[in-house]
Amino acid sequence: MAWYTEQWSNECKFSIAYDKELYSEKTPFQQIDFYQGEEFGTFFTLDGLMMVNEKDEFVYHDMIVHPAFATNPSIKKVLIIGGGDGGTAREVLRYTTVEEVVMVEIDERVFRLCQEFLPVTANGVEEDSRMKLLFDDGLAYVKNAPDQSFDLILVDSTDPISVGEGLFTTEFYKECYRVLNEDGILINQHESPYFAEYAANMKKAHRKIKDIFPITHVYQYHMPTYPSGHWLFGFASKTFDPLKDLNAEAWEKFGLKTKYYNTNLHAGAFGLPSYVKEALQRG
Ligand code: AAT
């Protein structure tokens, strides 16, 4: 048995025991490592940061996808930026009403390796005829995408360091606004309020999005293997408000069995602790 250790702050580390390092590769974009352990099953890291593991991936992938569909059950065209493990696409594809999913992942190796080592998220994604898989930079893709061509954009990105940096810029959020339909929704990986470095990213992202979208919210969930375990998504929208427009009845009709998300939890997720609200307001 060996230990995978991740630095969560200058004075805090998180460790997981593993039995085997399954695979390791340095791509032109990042360092990829796959491990196998008992507690969290198979997991992979990018540049030494936990991305996905078999035990808690359902939390993240439920929460990045379902709140938007429970707010606007008519979503048909979806753009996923990043998300190379396939978990976000897997959840979106469960909606039979969805007609087209474009996924733009910068690093094809993440997707191919997840097909090999992490079928729980990657299986069935490429095979679905509604799916268009592109291996490209998300920022470059949105810059060239036509106006008003998506109902929903899901930014399933790494932290704003190295390749993920462009996905936390005003330029990127503006392009997202442009390519979204009149009632479009943007969900983005919004970092964490707890440790200083992550909280700074959270505030920066919120400040930029607030200047562009008329409706902006931040919602939370418990992600045991991300720094502090307290993680956030942003909900930015042109017309739909996730609290006022929650359509629980329509969402229940989809008949999806979910392990984390439900329509009772929906409003609660948007109810932020006071210190988080204040940090976001101060900007
Ligand atoms: N589903 C949860 C997993 C992730 S991985 C995020 C993905 O974003 C990675 O596969 C990475 O290659 C991809 N990515 C990073 N930058 C870009 C870019 N510019 N364009 C397209 N794809 C990109 C998210 C984990 C969140 C971790 C939080 N600590």
Image (cartoon, grey):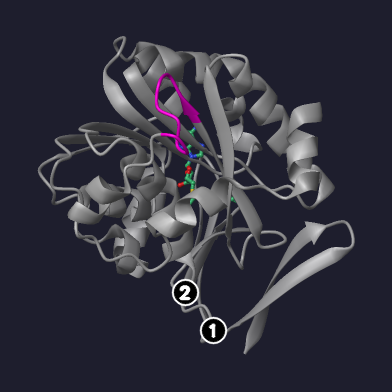
Please say if the residues under marks 2 and 1 sit with CB atoms less than 8 Å apart: yes
Q: Tell whether 188 sits left or right of 226.
A: left
Instruction: Please identify the quadrant where the C terminus is shown.
Output: top right
Q: Secondary structure at mark 2?
A: loop
Q: Position of residue 224 (x, y in %)?
A: 61, 68
Looking at the rendered structure, which numbered label has been put on residue 39? Answer: 1
Q: Tell whether 123 sits left or right of 112.
A: left
Q: Position of residue 281 (x, y in %)?
A: 76, 29
Tag 1: amino acid: Glu
Is residue 146 located in the magenta-colored stretch of the structure? no
Judging depth in this view, the residue of 270 and 7 nearest the camera is 270
Disc on the earlier residue, 2 or 1: 1
Q: Which residues are magenta?
A: 236-244
What type of secondary structure mainly makes up the magenta span? Answer: loop
The image quadrant that residue 221 belongs to is bottom right
Judging depth in this view, the residue of 226 and 266 nearest the camera is 266
Q: Tell whether 117 sits left or right of 209.
A: left
Is residue 242 located in the magenta-colored stretch of the structure? yes
Instruction: List the single residue furthest toward the left.
Output: 129
So how many labels did they put on this image? 2
Q: Position of residue 97 (x, y in %)?
A: 14, 41
Q: Position of residue 131 (x, y in %)?
A: 19, 40
Q: Is residue 28 visible?
A: yes
Q: Which residue is mark 2?
A: 55
Q: Is residue 48 visible?
A: no
Question: Which residue sits at x=73%, y=39%?
Answer: 277
